[in-house]
Image (cartoon, coloured by chain):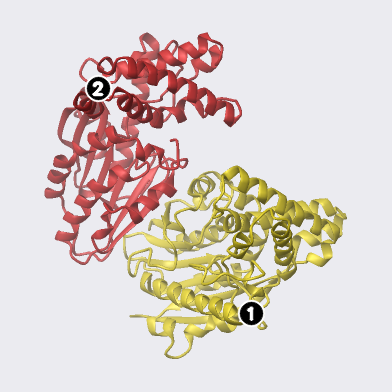
Chain colours: A red, B yellow
Amino acid sequence: MEGKGAYDRHSLAQHSAGRFGIPVLERALAGLVVPTERRSPLLVADFGAAGGRNELGPMSIAVGALRARAADTPIVVVHTDIPTNDFSTLFETVEHSPDTYLHTPGVYPLAAGRSFYEQILPPESVTLGWSAIAVHWLSRVPTPIPEHVYSSFATGDVRAAFSAQSASDWDAFLRARAVELRDGAALVVVGGAASDDGAPGAEALMDALDRALRRARDAGAITADEYLHMNVPTWNRTLAEFSAPFASGAAATRAGLRLEEHSLAEVPDAYLAAFREDGDAAGFADSVTAFLRAFTEPSLFESLDRPPSERASLAGDVYADVRGRLLADPAAHETVWRVALLRITRSPR
Amino acid sequence: MEGKGAYDRHSLAQHSAGRFGIPVLERALAGLVVPTERRSPLLVADFGAAGGRNELGPMSIAVGALRARAADTPIVVVHTDIPTNDFSTLFETVEHSPDTYLHTPGVYPLAAGRSFYEQILPPESVTLGWSAIAVHWLSRVPTPIPEHVYSSFATGDVRAAFSAQSASDWDAFLRARAVELRDGAALVVVGGAASDDGAPGAEALMDALDRALRRARDAGAITADEYLHMNVPTWNRTLAEFSAPFASGAAATRAGLRLEEHSLAEVPDAYLAAFREDGDAAGFADSVTAFLRAFTEPSLFESLDRPPSERASLAGDVYADVRGRLLADPAAHETVWRVALLRITRSPR
């Protein structure tokens, strides 16, 4: 991530998408087995927290509901992300944001710096799990994508490799959670998704990014090899892909998880709606470019074997090019992200 | 802290000092009440972790001893520091260092981004606490120190203000731990200390730093007001100051803590010993400057109201000046840090 809070400042779309999960979270809380007889803390886990801003709403709802049912039990909230995440922004946000869930008494925020494709927390320790707009990030890039940076444009063997990596990662995520969740615990996943035909809804935007990068390559600013290895390592799963491990005899089912509900939602383009209200194309282009840059620049530019100043300058040029494309035709770059809403429970052992 | 692992790379003295606490830690572990009947995890807390490198040895000893007495109980290690700490380095170090305590099975590392002068963890949750070379950092600068950057040179009212801040912070630290520790739990503190006359043993080194800063001020490179507000906000306590809250009726005693043992140790100057072996004055000057810079630059330069490039350039000049002083006379800058070794237990409630 870009660091210093940039992801948080430019994650309106992720924020909106996470909100789609609130009714599912509320149903999960209503059905939850809350062990009130124990003095040991109730553990809530937030898998893939980034800077934390988008987690405050759901976590406030979760700790509020748990506090109502267990007046004196301490609640520990563990925010997880990979070690390179900006944990300082995360901690500052949780401590100092007016929207913090720390208004509920007896709540203790912690963090874990480990990929959620591994076990992070002790067995049978988690009462509620939450993950919003995070599981589309793959654990690794299975293969370069020739002629594009975004996996939804991949075809043939390359597409198959991404699909297989996605299936393997999703199985690993679920198996790890099955170990961590207590009997009767719930896990809500708001997952970056794709419609049944595999379209995440951001094709035009990601293609504008790719066109800008190819122009930089064709102009010699970046090499053909650098372009080949540039990649946003995500895969937006279809509902069928999200559901597959819950089939009879499949990985999640064997591990003790049940898929209680699953649905697909479309996230309207808030930036384009604003442009249609106010006609401010420059504002649209600025906002969408900042949003795009916050979640793609680290993957695309940080691994370039060049001095930081050169990387920053290249990235500046590429995103300026993207901004120009957005400015010229906002409507052509409408982005309607799909999100999957999953409610999962842990069956008794 | 300087970030990107600089503190970890240049914290040999802190590392050596922490090692003095190992026998105390082993006595604490031997006397510990370990609740093996519960399935809930054993919690070990490391207060003031910085980049984590200096914590791996003590934490390996702690989790090894707990695992020997509770074969199947998960162990959670929570590393705490202020939100601006470099948690990415901390997590990377714990995950990937060959010296990690994760060789012991069933151990889960977490972090907390909150000052240890507040409660961080749930009541009665901590089985073992550890803090090495951290409690000399004050929660705030009580008052500027005219004509020096280091509190051990303060006199009169300024000295009294630092001493009072130190007493208040130490009380707050102990009261917070008294809430968090389980009955029978232990807390080991290796504290940056001073001999009975108030000398931390780093006077010559800190004076070299101050002289370099005053030269920069007198040359007009930094303003008189900037110099006045430059401060390394630490206070190295005497053993009497460390012990005071444990007197009958004092804060820690009232909160349920007992001081089981306390002693003062001197940490020999490893850098000067190396110089006396190899005669490499430049190596001595480089190492000691890097050590000094890692723990003083953030406090002194990050709050200057100037562009980052200007701050970096000023800091570069000042530490180059310090290096020259060290190079000219290594023996005159011998640094023999004092550390207090405290073993504290939580009395039954």
Q: Are marks 1 and 2 on the same chain?
A: no
Q: Secondary structure at mark 1?
A: loop
Which SS class for mark 2?
loop
Residue B159 seen in this snapshot: yes
Residue A66 drawn above or below residue A162: below
In this view, A79 is above or below B130? above
Q: Are marks 1 and 2 in contact (CB under 8 Å)?
A: no
> How would you rate the neighbour count of disc 2 (Cα within 10 Å): few for under 14, some for 14-19, many for 20 or more?
many
Eyeballing the image, is B10 above or below B348? above
Q: Chain of mark 1?
A: B
Q: Label 1 sits on what residue type?
A: Thr
**Residue B295 location, x and y as percent?**
62, 58
Q: CA distance from mark 1 to mark 2?
A: 68 Å
Question: Residue placed at 59% from the left, 78% from the top?
Answer: B159
Q: Position of residue B68 (x, y in %)?
A: 47, 61
Image quadrant assignment for residue B132:
bottom right
Q: Nearer the viewer, mark 1 or mark 2?
A: 1
Task: State whether residue A92 is above or below residue A242.
Answer: below
> Residue A194 — which label?
2
Q: Position of residue A183 (x, y in %)?
A: 21, 49
Residue A152 in sight from this viewpoint: no
Give, as a three-letter code, the residue at label 2: Ala
**Between residues A337 and A348, which one lies in front from this camera angle?**
A337
Q: Is residue A266 left or right of residue B149?
A: left
Chain letter for the residue marked with disc 2 in the picture: A
Where residue B114 sits, quadrant-wise, is bottom left
Residue named by callout 1: B155
Residue A140 lies left or right of residue B20; in this view the side is left
Front-most of A157 and A296?
Answer: A296
